């Protein structure tokens, strides 16, 4: 008799996620489990079929082979023994424990060492610090190993003892309906050990609060959103587990002169209308010091000048080249004019013509043509 498609057996699509497959298998296993359907050959066959499908589809290598070549690629790789009153075929027992373990507590192993939690610290930098690199010191509140009990949680000179309720396994057997399941021991909370005489310094926790002072090496070129990892500087682990990491997240303050976009810097440069008309030379600030910028005659607002290599060196953090500084000109309209200045401007206006203001002339011509088109 030809086998049914494994995806069809579980009622999932071919692009189903691992969680979707587990969910479908749980539903079918609960429905057709032989302990729930004694002496029902059809239910036993359905349970066996679902377990076989789950075993293949929850194994990435077997699933890939099945997707390419069908049953021919995986025949013989599944457990097909009989069930009797329980499980047959070791692989079905394994897949059942794997799928139901996250619900019912898994196997009878006690909890091992736990890695400490990772920590995050927001480091605010000035633009100059971010561009040039820096080595600031930060203070981080964290959990460290207790210096009195060295992380054991037990009073100095004593040790944790095996839990009498679970026999040191960290798991106890319980009954839920038709299943005998393993659950975390409520007395030792899965550790398999209990502390009869806790450390007076940490209260039996094995860890204590401390504010650590750390030095952070900030490479040149970092920007807002970048992260610097300090391995092992997170919270201390429990039960001998390794410490977590500290992730320093960079935030760069806005600068009063420069704006940044990647490796490039930008600044607005206000100049007088006289310098814009006649040209001149200005001192421009950069992060490396001052440089002179020549302003050609008849420079307009919005004109942008590029200073090569005066941006940000990002080669250490992103690769690539050193950026540039872009200076955008803003022609400033004079204010607070004296009577004499007003007279001079009026005299200038009386002698100016269309050739002196080509942008205005072009715009007025466009406006006239638009209005004429509306009246035609």
Image (tube, rainbow, N blue to C red):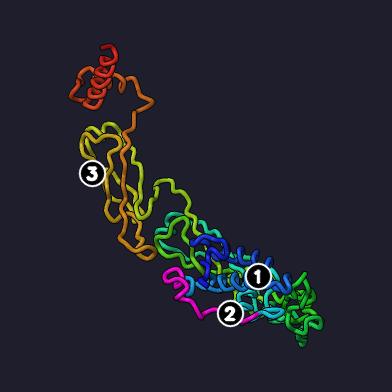
Q: Quadrant of the C terminus?
A: top left
Q: CA distance from mark 1 to mark 3?
A: 91 Å
Name the residue at the top extreme.
375
Magenta span of residues: 65-82
Residue at x 49% of width, y 55% of height:
251
Q: Position of residue 352 (x, y in %)?
A: 21, 21
Q: Is residue 93 magenta?
A: no
Label 1 belongs to which residue?
A: 42
How far apart, in angstroms, are the residues tagged by discs 2 and 3? 85 Å
In depth, the one of 208 and 153 nearer the eye is 153
Q: Quadrant of residue 145?
A: bottom right
> Horizontal placement of 309 versus 240: left or right?
left
Q: Which residue is mark 3?
A: 294
Using residue 131 as the reference point, say whether residue 344 is left or right of it.
Answer: left
Identified at 69% across, 80% down, the residue is 84
Q: Is residue 202 left or right of residue 134?
A: right
Name the residue beneath numbered marker 2.
Answer: 80
Q: What is the residue that sits farthest to the left in this orientation?
A: 355
User: Mark 2 or mark 3: which is in front?
Assistant: 2
Query: Mark 1 Cα within 10 Å, few/some/many (few <14, many 20+)?
Result: few
The kind of secondary structure element at disc 2 is: loop
Residues at marks 1 and 3 touching, judged by CB atoms closer than 8 Å? no
Does residue 130 appear in the picture of this structure?
A: yes
């Amino acid at each position: 008799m030809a086998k049914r498609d494994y995806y069809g057996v579980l009622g999932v699509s071919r692009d189903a996620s691992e969680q979707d497959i587990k969910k479908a298998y749980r539903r079918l296993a609960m429905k057709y489990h032989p302990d729930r359907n004694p002496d029902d050959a059809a239910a036993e066959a359905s349970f066996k079929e679902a377990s076989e499908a789950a075993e293949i589809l929850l194994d990435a290598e077997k699933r890939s082979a099945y997707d390419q070549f069908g049953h021919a690629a995986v025949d013989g790789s599944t457990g097909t023994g009989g069930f009797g009153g329980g499980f047959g075929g070791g692989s079905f027992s394994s897949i059942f424990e794997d799928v139901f373990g996250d619900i019912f507590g898994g196997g009878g192993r006690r909890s091992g060492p736990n890695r400490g939690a990772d920590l995050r610290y927001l480091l605010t930098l000035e633009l100059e610090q971010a561009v040039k690199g820096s080595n600031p010191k930060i203070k981080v509140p964290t959990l460290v190993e207790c210096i009195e009990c060295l992380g054991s949680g037990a009073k100095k000179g004593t040790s944790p003892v095996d839990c009498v309720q679970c026999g040191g396994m960290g798991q106890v057997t319980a009954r839920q309906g038709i299943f005998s399941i393993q659950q975390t021991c409520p007395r030792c909370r899965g550790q398999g050990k209990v502390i009869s005489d806790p450390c007076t310094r940490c209260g039996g926790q094995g860890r204590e609060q401390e504010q650590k002072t750390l030095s952070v090496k900030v490479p040149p070129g970092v920007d807002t959103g970048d992260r610097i990892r300090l391995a092992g500087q997170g919270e201390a682990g429990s039960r001998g587990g390794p410490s977590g990491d500290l992730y320093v997240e960079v935030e760069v303050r806005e600068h009063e002169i420069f704006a940044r976009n990647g490796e490039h810097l930008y600044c607005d440069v206000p100049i007088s209308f006289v310098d814009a008309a006649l040209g001149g030379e200005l001192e421009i600030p950069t992060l490396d010091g001052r440089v002179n910028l020549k302003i050609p005659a008849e420079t307009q607002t919005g004109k942008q000048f590029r200073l090569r290599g005066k941006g940000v060196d990002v080669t250490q953090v992103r690769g690539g080249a050193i950026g540039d500084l872009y200076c955008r000109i803003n022609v400033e309209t004079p204010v607070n004019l004296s009577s004499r200045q007003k007279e001079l401007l009026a005299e200038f206006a009386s002698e100016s013509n269309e050739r002196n203001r080509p942008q205005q002339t072009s715009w007025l011509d466009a406006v006239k043509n638009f209005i004429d088109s509306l009246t035609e």
